[in-house]
Image (cartoon, coloured by chain):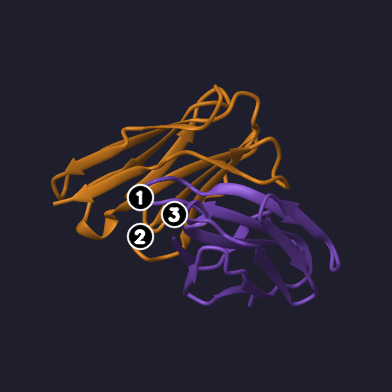
């Protein structure tokens, strides 16, 4: 069964304290892995798509990496405005292009 | 438009009443999705429209739920005879094609009392 697991469920960091969020997946062939950010009361905001192991993408303080089993979202020197829930989703080959979503990691950055 | 627009942003309804939720996707986006997000839960897929193809309704939780997309643009999600367990945020998303990242609206928060 295709599955996406995110860890930790919640993460509290001090401003400037770098860390990583994990997204582990099991799918019958990966078409793409997506990272989103969701602020309270808003819909998820698209961040990155990764397609193959070894691929990396960066945006400001965020960098996403991908292996054959998991993806990491690295946050370098975070600021309070990086506080949000980060969602991971995968799209499997041979599927009807539906995304399988993780439950998210709630990130809190304290000033 | 510049983004995905959903209306209303909030809806409180009495149990047993019907509700309609509207989604106006980004112009030119052929793919449109409806999801449901309950408090503290992940995103639950409801229905997917791709161009003029028959919609994928495999995520609709019961026959009280239906959706249509007129003219390949605006979509309406209808919930008949609402139940308290239908209370959630209903999110709409669109994308230029089914392999691309989605752009989400801000959602409709539905509360059934």
In percent of width and height, residue A32 lies at: 75, 58
Evaluate if marks 3 and 2 touch, with contact meaning CB atoms under 8 Å apart: no
Q: Which residue is mark 2?
A: B38
Q: Chain under label 2?
A: B
Mark 3, other Cα within 10 Å: few <14 / some 14–19 / many ≥20: some
Image quadrant in which you'd find residue A35: bottom right
- Dot 1 or dot 3: first in sequence order is 3
Chain for numbered disc 1: B
**Who's the residue at 30% across and 45% down the image?**
B109
Describe residue A31's horizontal placement relative to residue B98 as left or right: right
Instruction: Tell me the distance, in whole angstroms, between the alpha carbons under discs 1 and 3.
Output: 15 Å
For label 1, the crowd category at 10 Å Cα-Cα, with few meaning under 14, some 14 to 19 and many 20 or more, is many
> What residue is rendered at 40% in x and 56% in y?
B37
Q: Is residue B22 above or below residue A99?
A: above
Q: Residues within 10 Å of mark 2 (few under 14, many from 20)?
A: some
Q: Which residue is mark 1?
A: B89
Q: Nearer the viewer, mark 3 or mark 2?
A: 2
Task: Kindly indicate whether the residue at mark 2 contacts the one at mark 1 (C-beta within 8 angstroms).
Answer: yes
Residue A105 screen position, x and y as percent = 50, 68
Q: How many angstroms separate mark 3 from mark 2 (CA)?
A: 15 Å
* Label 1 SS: strand
Task: Reply above or below: B2 against A1.
Answer: above
Chain A colour is: purple
- Image quadrant of residue B52? top right
According to the picture, the residue beneath numbered tag 3 turns out to be B60
Kind of element beneath mark 3? loop
Closest to the observer, A33 or A14: A14
* Left or right, B58 with reference to A25: left
């Amino acid at each position: 069964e295709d599955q996406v697991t995110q860890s930790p469920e919640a993460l509290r960091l001090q401003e400037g304290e770098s860390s990583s969020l994990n997204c582990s997946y099991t799918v019958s062939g990966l078409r793409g892995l997506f990272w989103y950010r969701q602020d309270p009361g808003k819909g998820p905001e698209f961040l990155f798509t990764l397609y193959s192991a070894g691929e990396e993408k960066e945006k400001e303080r965020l960098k996403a990496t991908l292996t054959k089993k998991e993806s990491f979202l690295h946050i370098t020197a975070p600021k309070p405005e990086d506080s949000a829930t980060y969602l991971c989703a995968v799209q499997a080959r041979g599927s009807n292009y539906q995304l399988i979503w993780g439950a998210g990691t709630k990130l809190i950055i304290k000033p | 438009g510049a983004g995905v627009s959903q209306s209303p942003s909030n809806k409180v309804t009495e149990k047993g009443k019907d509700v309609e939720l509207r989604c106006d996707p980004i112009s030119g986006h052929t793919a449109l999705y409806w999801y449901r997000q309950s408090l503290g839960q992940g995103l639950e897929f409801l229905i997917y429209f791709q161009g003029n193809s028959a919609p994928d309704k495999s995520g609709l939780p019961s026959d009280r739920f239906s959706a249509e997309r007129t003219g390949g643009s605006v979509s309406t999600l209808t919930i008949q005879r609402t139940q308290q367990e239908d209370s959630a945020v209903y999110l709409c998303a669109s994308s230029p094609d089914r392999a691309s990242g989605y752009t989400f609206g801000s959602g409709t928060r539905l509360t059934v009392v």
